[in-house]
Amino acid sequence: MLLKTLREEVLEANLELVRRGLVLYTFGNVSGIDRGEGLVAIKPSGVPYEELTPAQIVISDLQGTIVDGKLRPSSDLPTHLELYRHFSNICGVAHTHSEFATAWAQAETPIPCFGTTHADYFHGPVPVTARLSASEIAGEYELETGVAICRTFAKLDPRAIPAVLVAGHAPFCWGASAAEAAHNAVILEYVARMACHTLSINPESRPLAHELHDKHFLRKHGRNAYYGQVKTQ
Amino acid sequence: MLLKTLREEVLEANLELVRRGLVLYTFGNVSGIDRGEGLVAIKPSGVPYEELTPAQIVISDLQGTIVDGKLRPSSDLPTHLELYRHFSNICGVAHTHSEFATAWAQAETPIPCFGTTHADYFHGPVPVTARLSASEIAGEYELETGVAICRTFAKLDPRAIPAVLVAGHAPFCWGASAAEAAHNAVILEYVARMACHTLSINPESRPLAHELHDKHFLRKHGRNAYYGQVKTQ
Amino acid sequence: MLLKTLREEVLEANLELVRRGLVLYTFGNVSGIDRGEGLVAIKPSGVPYEELTPAQIVISDLQGTIVDGKLRPSSDLPTHLELYRHFSNICGVAHTHSEFATAWAQAETPIPCFGTTHADYFHGPVPVTARLSASEIAGEYELETGVAICRTFAKLDPRAIPAVLVAGHAPFCWGASAAEAAHNAVILEYVARMACHTLSINPESRPLAHELHDKHFLRKHGRNAYYGQVKTQ
Amino acid sequence: MLLKTLREEVLEANLELVRRGLVLYTFGNVSGIDRGEGLVAIKPSGVPYEELTPAQIVISDLQGTIVDGKLRPSSDLPTHLELYRHFSNICGVAHTHSEFATAWAQAETPIPCFGTTHADYFHGPVPVTARLSASEIAGEYELETGVAICRTFAKLDPRAIPAVLVAGHAPFCWGASAAEAAHNAVILEYVARMACHTLSINPESRPLAHELHDKHFLRKHGRNAYYGQVKTQ
C-alpha cells in the first residue's frame, strides 16, 4: 500500500517536469523516499514520460538494491541515494537538464541571489560543485556526483538551499517530498532564466542585500511565515 | 452587488496574467478598488489560479482591515493600499514576477524608452525604486515597498508612467481599473523583453527622441487621441 | 465581389500574424490593394483579432479617403498608402511590433545577412530608416514614416528586399499580396531572432559572401528558381 | 512494400521536426535510405508539412535519379546523397534551419562541448564547415555543400559526431535511421540553445574535461552502455 502511494507520488512529480517544460524526450528523473521503510522510488531509465505507469516506477533500498520493479532504474540513482543518505531531512530529489539551470551549471557559475523570487526559495546563491577528478569519473561516476554535491554542502544547509548545479552537467534539486523537489526544479529554472537576463541587462548587477534576502526567505519559511493560507513548516 | 462585480473584475484581471504567461504557480496578484466605498478587492495569498473563485477574492478597506472574505489576502496587500492612498486616480494594481520585467528590476536599471511600443504606454523610462534600508525591511516591509514606490514618483505622474520596478524584486503596474493594470503588466513584460534584446544587439542603443515619445503617447492618450475606435480618456 | 475577396484575403493575412505569434493584443496590421480599382483594404484600428470579420476591414482609396466600412482604419494607413504609391509592384503591406524585428529597429541596426535563411527572402541587409525630424513628427507623422521608408529605398529594390526597420519603431514588410506581406513579416521575425543570437555567440560574425547570398536568393526567385513544386515569378 | 515502410518512416521523421518546433513553414527536410536497394526517400520541396502524405515522399537512387514519386524532391537532395555515399553507416539525414543551431552556423563557431547533455550525443565539438568558394557556389552548390561536410569529417567519425554546422547556412544531422537523424536534430537544437546561454552567462566557460566527455558518450553508446532499458548499438 505504501509503495503504491509513493509510486504514484513519484510518477506525478515526474510528470510535473513535463507539464512545466523542463524535459526533452526522456531527460530528467524524480525520486521519493519512504524514510520509515528506507525505500526509494525512482523513474526507470529511458522510458518516455507519456507511457510511464506507477508500476514502472522502480523501488530500491538505500544501498541501490532493486527491491521491486521490472525495469532498470534511472542511471542517476546512485546520486539520488547519496543525497538521501547524507541529507537526512529530505524526502524527494529531482534531476533535470532544464535549459537555463543547465546553462549555469555548464558556465560553472553559482546563481547569485539577484531578487526576491530567488530568496523566496533559496537562502543564498545556488552553488556549483567542483569538477570531478579523472579517477572519480572512471570510478563510480554517479555515486561520485552525489559525493561532490555533499562536499559542496559541507558548510551549507540543504533545507535552506534545496538545489545545486553539478559542474558541466545539470541541476539536482530536493525537498520534503518528490512533489516539492520537482517544484523546486521548476522554480530553479525560472530563477536561472531571470538571472541570465539580469546579467545580460547589467553585467554589474549586485546580489540582494542580505536583510532582504533573509526577509523573503523567512516570509515563506520558518516559524513566522505569513505567505499562503496555512503556515508551512 | 457592487462587491460582486468588483470581485469578478479582479478575478478576471488576475486570470489575464495567467493567459498571457506572466505567472508561474501562484506568483503575482491583481487588485481593484471601489473608490466610492473605499474598498479594495485582492487575490488571496497562495491560492492556485485555476481554483480561484470570485468569492475567494478578499475585500479590505484602505487601512488593511479585512471586510469580507475567508482567506488571507495576498501578502503584498499593504503595497497595493499605499499606492491607492497616494495615487488618487488609479483604480487597479497588478504585481507580477514576469520574466523580463523582473530581470530589469533585478538589474536595478530603468527601462529606457527605446521605441514607440514603450512610448504608447509609458511616457518616459520605467523607473526603479531605491533599495530599502535594513530598518525598512525589518519593519513593515510590504508597506515600505509602497512608500518607496511613491517616493520614486515624487516628481513623476503615475498616470503617464503606470509602472515601476522595485529594486531586487519585481514590477508593480496600475491603471484606471484592475483590467487596465493587468493589461499594463502584459505590455511592460513585452517592452522589457524587447529592450533587453535591443541592448544585446547594440549596447549603445539610444532612447527615442522626446518628440516621437510625446507623439506616440499622445496618439493613444489625452484630448487628441486618434488610435482605436473611440476616443479614450 | 472583388472587395469581398480582397477583404477576406486581408483578414486572413492579419490572422496569420496571430497564428505565428507576431502580435500582442491589437498590435499590427496588414493591408492589400486592388491595383485595378486603386482600392486598399486594411485592418480597422484597435479591434481585437479574434473578433475581426471581413465586413470590418476598411476600404480606402490611395489618397486615404474611406470608400467603404464603418470603422476607423488602422492609424498606420497613411504609411501603407505611401508605400503603395511609390512601390508600384507591391500589393500587400504588413506592419508588426514583433519581438526581435522590433528590437533591431530599436537598436537602429540593419539586420546583416548572416545566413541563407535571410538570403532566401531578403537580397541584402534589412535596412533601417533615418530618424524622423521634429517637424516630420509634428506634421503628418504616419505619412512621413512612409516617406522615410521610400527615402531608405532610393537606391534599393523593394521587391528584392521586401522589408524595412523604421528607426525606434518597428518593421514594415510587403509583397505581391497581403498574404505574402504577412509571410515576409513572419520570416523577418525569424531571421531577426537568429541574427540576434548569432551576434551573441560571436560578435565578430561576418555576413554571407555575396556569391552565396545571390545563389540563395535566385534559387527561390527569378527565372531559374528551382525551389518548391512550381516555378514562381 | 519496403518503399512503403521507408516512406512512412521518413514522413514520420519529418513530422517530428514539426512537433519539436524545429521548422517554420516548409523549412527543413529529412531523408532515409534503404541500403539494400540503394534507394533514398526524401521530403518533396516546398510542400506544407500538414499536407504531407507518404505517397508524396520522393524516391531517388544514390545518383539523384528520381525512381518514384510525382513531386520534385527537396532541393537539398544532392547534399543528402553525398552524405549517404561517404558515410557508409548512416541511414538517415535531417536538415533544419532550427533557431539556435542555425545561429551557431551563422556565427561560424563550432559548438563546444560544455556539458554532459552534449557529450551524451556528440563525442566532441560540433564542427563548422569552411565557407564554399565562389566557384563551388556557382557550380553544383548543393552537392558541394555535401562535399564540404565530408571534408570537415576527414579526420572525424560521423557516427560519434552525428551533426555538422554548414557555415552561413544551417545544421545537417544524421543517424542510423531517419528517426534517429531527426532525433539528433532536436538534441542539437537543445544543445545549441544551452551553449548560447552558457557563453552569455560566462564568456570564459570551459569545455568538459575529456574524461567526463568520454564517460557520458560511452554511457549511452558502445559495448558497455548502461542508459535506458536495452543496450543499444
Image (spheres, coloured by chain):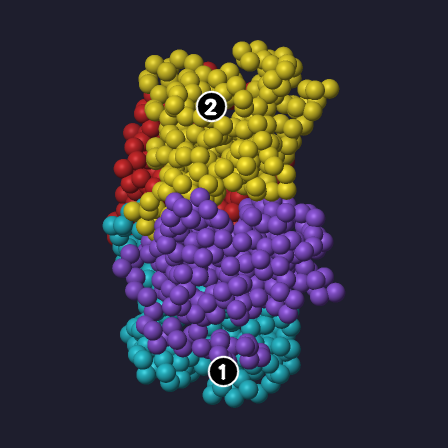
Chain colours: A cyan, B red, C yellow, D purple
Instruction: Mark 2 and mark 1 in contact? Answer it, CB < 8 Å.
Output: no
Callout 1: SS: loop
Quickly name the residue at label 2. Answer: B220
Which of these two is toward me, C157 or B2? C157
Question: Distance from label 2 to label 1 (Cα)?
Answer: 68 Å
Residue plotted at (30% across, 61% down): D205
In the image, is A230 to the left or to the right of A111?
Answer: right
Q: Is residue A221 above or below residue C159?
A: below
Which of these two is toward me, A89 or D200? D200
User: Is there any visible trace of residue B179 in the rendered image?
Assistant: no
Amino acid tagged 2? Lys
The image shows residue C231 at horizontal and vertical percentages of 61, 37
In the image, is C220 to the left or to the right of D195?
Answer: right
- Chain ID for label 2? B
Residue plotted at (72% across, 61% down): D4
Which of these two is toward me, A3 or C125? C125
- Chain ID for label 1? D
Quadrant occupied by the N terminus of chain A: bottom right
Quickly name the residue at label 1. Answer: D223
Instruction: Count neighbours of disc 1 (C-alpha within 10 A) and say few if under 14, some if 14 to 19, many if 20 or more.
Output: few
Q: Hey, which quadrant is residue D54 in on the image?
A: bottom right
The image shows residue A4 at horizontal and vertical percentages of 63, 78
Callout 2: SS: helix
User: Is there any visible trace of residue A130 in the rendered image?
Assistant: yes
